[in-house]
Amino acid sequence: MTLSASSPVGIFDSGIGGLTVVKAIQALLPSERIIYFGDTARVPYGSKSQVTIRKYAQDDAGILMKHQPKMIIVACNTVSALALDVVEQVGKGIPVLGVLEAGAELAVQHSRNNRIGVIGTRATIESNAYSFAINALKPEIEVFSSACPLLVPLAEEGFIDHPAAGMIARDYLAELVGWGVDTLVLGCTHYPILKKMIGKITGPDIRIIDSAEAVAAKAKELLAENNLLNGSGAPVSPHLLVSDLPRKFRSLCRLFLGTDIPDVELVEV
Amino acid sequence: MTLSASSPVGIFDSGIGGLTVVKAIQALLPSERIIYFGDTARVPYGSKSQVTIRKYAQDDAGILMKHQPKMIIVACNTVSALALDVVEQVGKGIPVLGVLEAGAELAVQHSRNNRIGVIGTRATIESNAYSFAINALKPEIEVFSSACPLLVPLAEEGFIDHPAAGMIARDYLAELVGWGVDTLVLGCTHYPILKKMIGKITGPDIRIIDSAEAVAAKAKELLAENNLLNGSGAPVSPHLLVSDLPRKFRSLCRLFLGTDIPDVELVEV
């Protein structure tokens, strides 16, 4: 397969949380065509087993490959943590970028006191993948992590400013803050829409790392290295594929992307 | 296929919330063999589309049919609301009982002021299936319903007494209580484990209908009518089938069933 600069950037996620990555890519690389797959029929992944997550990752990457992308971005932290090698196998040599590695790298760059906090789904946190990625870059860093399983449904339900959401987030974050981390990685693509609320809890001294922005910067670098940047052309709407179209879909798109989605295609998994 | 009293009772749910039905059946019919399937690889159903829910219901019923049950109980309110006919087709003539019909019937028996409240997943509530079922029995009853999508993850995470869960439930229930209902149907098999918290919010004047208990009573009736009751024999542990075995599985079983599960089999969907 020959890769060309005009080929699309493929992005997938367990659901539509990964649209935070689409938004970041659009902001940084407005001329890139984006093909996005969200596995809305089987979401969420973060509470499921590694075997199941790896099976789903294979399906998801296969769906994107039909559109001959020049790169695959795994917008799902859970898949990045547990099944990046599966995506690389399906990708047959095209660059594959996991949101996790990008977030880990940015966190390492920013931490001054070598104490980094990570929050994510249960599967992501139990995999220890963030600790491995961070310590591979800088072994002396101490990583403190906390699984925050309820933040995904709270984000999806739009409980962004609800006092109950703040109460739950405060419970999840209390220990992390107590450990004196100076950097906190939002290790789930749903969390950026709760960033303001999380920032209020962690306070001004803890730098929050949004993996969506981190992976967009990394994608730009990697495309440039491979001479695959699409530098020109008017911005085009992303092409969205989903495995289910639940009623809430449009309002969720608006929440994650900030705009309506004109073009959505239903695919079978 | 010949049905026999010694055949198992088949029960399925989108995940393991339906174990509240298993528990109710065990309490009422201790000699019955139970085969349970929980689609833990694709849970939850309640936020997905009707097309997807009907496809999953067909798979789930097919998995149970391999074990030649004498009856299928649909422990999932969402499937009961949107795909009971699919299960009946797959069941090829064996009795099929939906948790929704049983709950609706019991609510109609109990309401004195003809104002019934129903809470459930978004898919269940938007289907209006409870209103249809209740009004088919008694047209003059007014049904007030409210989708409570966050109660499922709150129950699964064991936030049973957490003040944030109470705050969210109070928000969901405020309107229902204001309408002056005297009966409230817990239209989701996850909700019975939040019954105490919900009862505190609704107060002593609103009778809470637990669909799990309602469907168990109905199952006993139906088995007796068909001469299929297994009246004798020592209690046996239910045979559990699941499509995924996430790490949290054992603690969830304990939460829903009150005991450990000795025998769990992983099946592909």
Image: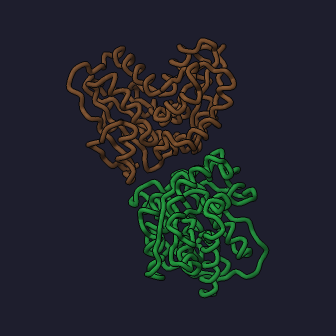
Chain colours: A brown, B green
The spot of residue A198 in percent (x, y) is 54, 31
Q: Nearer the viewer, residue B233 or B188?
A: B188
Q: Position of residue B93 (x, y in %)?
A: 49, 79
Measured as percent of width and height from the top left, residue A9 is found at: 33, 29
Q: Is residue B112 above or below residue B87?
A: below
Residue closest to the eye, B268 or B230? B230
Q: Is residue A212 above or below residue B77?
A: above
- For the point 64% across and 56% down, the residue is B265
Residue at left offset 52%, top offset 18%: A105
Q: Quadrant of residue B112?
A: bottom right
Residue B32 location, quadrant: bottom right
Quadrant where the N terminus of chain A lies? Answer: top left
Front residue of A154 and A92: A154
Please tell me which residue is depicted at 54% across the width and 45% down the height of the picture.
Answer: A52
A261 left or right, relative to B195: left
Residue ranking furthest to the top: A112
In depth, the one of B213 and A157 nearer the eye is: A157
Residue B1 in view in this figure: no
